[in-house]
């Protein structure tokens, strides 16, 4: 009986690190710089990404007028899975926003990535931000990870999205009709 208990405890002890490692899946990007452009004015923010449970937070900081300013945007599991539009709420010092399930900040959703990965059609289109985007190519990479390059042919917007349903970061947005463009480095 004692041998069974020791054997059981040994199995639990050996399995624990494997379970703990699987639970701590690494984000492809933990730190970055995001440069936003609005009306030919540029602002560069330092950002860090952190997961807590099923939520993902983007913590930002910027130095303006010799003062450090910071805040965050948090995307819930619903937002990460199903967001269909971008949040354009301006970063304000001390503001920590939890976004509604329909919105994401600088991210697409897992639904968008999964739709782009489907092999059911030659011309892959997705609806994001109430706009039809067509997949142009998958030729570029960001930090070694493949990107989806999408274009809205009606208004000319282009997005490059990390091909990762758990972390669909929009690495670059150009020609955005609301005139807020960005690039992440």
Image: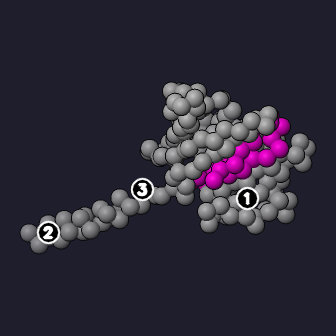
Q: How many marks?
A: 3
Q: Earlier in the sequence, mark 3 or mark 1?
A: 3
Mark 3 falls on what kind of element?
A: loop
Magenta segment range? Answer: 165-185
Figure quadrant of the N terminus: bottom left
Report the mark closest to the observer, 2 or 1. 1
**Element on which disc 1 rests:** strand
Q: Is residue 184 left or right of residue 150?
A: left
According to the image, label 2 marks what residue?
6
**Are there few (<14), some (14-19), or many (20+) residues within 10 Å of tag 3?**
few
The residue most toward the right is: 154
Q: Position of residue 103 (x, y in %)?
A: 65, 36
x 35%, y 58%: residue:
20
Mark 2: few, some, or many residues within 10 Å (few <14, many ≥20)? Answer: few
Q: Residues within 10 Å of mark 1 (few under 14, many from 20)?
A: many
Which residue appears farthest toward the front when viewing the image? 66
**Disc 1 marks which residue?**
148
Frontmost residue, 82 versus 34: 34
Q: Which mark is residue 24?
A: 3
- Report which quarter residue 131 is drawn in: top right
Determine the secondary structure under disc 2.
helix
**Residue 22, magenta (yes or no):** no
């Amino acid at each position: 009986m004692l041998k069974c208990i020791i054997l059981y405890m040994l199995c639990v002890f050996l399995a624990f690190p494997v379970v703990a490692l699987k639970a701590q899946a690494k984000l492809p990007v933990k730190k970055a710089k995001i440069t936003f452009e609005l009306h030919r004015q540029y602002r560069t923010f330092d950002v860090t990404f952190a997961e807590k449970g099923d939520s993902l937070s983007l913590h930002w900081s910027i130095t303006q007028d010799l003062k450090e300013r910071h805040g965050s945007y948090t995307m819930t599991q619903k937002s990460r899975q199903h967001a269909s539009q971008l949040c354009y709420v301006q970063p304000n010092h001390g503001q920590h926003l939890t976004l509604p399930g329909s919105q994401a900040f600088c991210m697409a959703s897992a639904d968008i990535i999964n739709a782009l990965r489907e092999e059911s059609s030659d011309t892959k289109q997705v609806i994001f931000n109430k706009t039809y985007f067509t997949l142009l190519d998958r030729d570029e990479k960001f930090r070694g990870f493949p990107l989806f390059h999408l274009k809205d042919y009606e208004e000319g917007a282009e997005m490059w999205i990390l091909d990762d349903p758990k972390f669909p970061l929009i690495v670059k947005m150009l020609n955005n009709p609301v005139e807020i463009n960005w690039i992440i480095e």
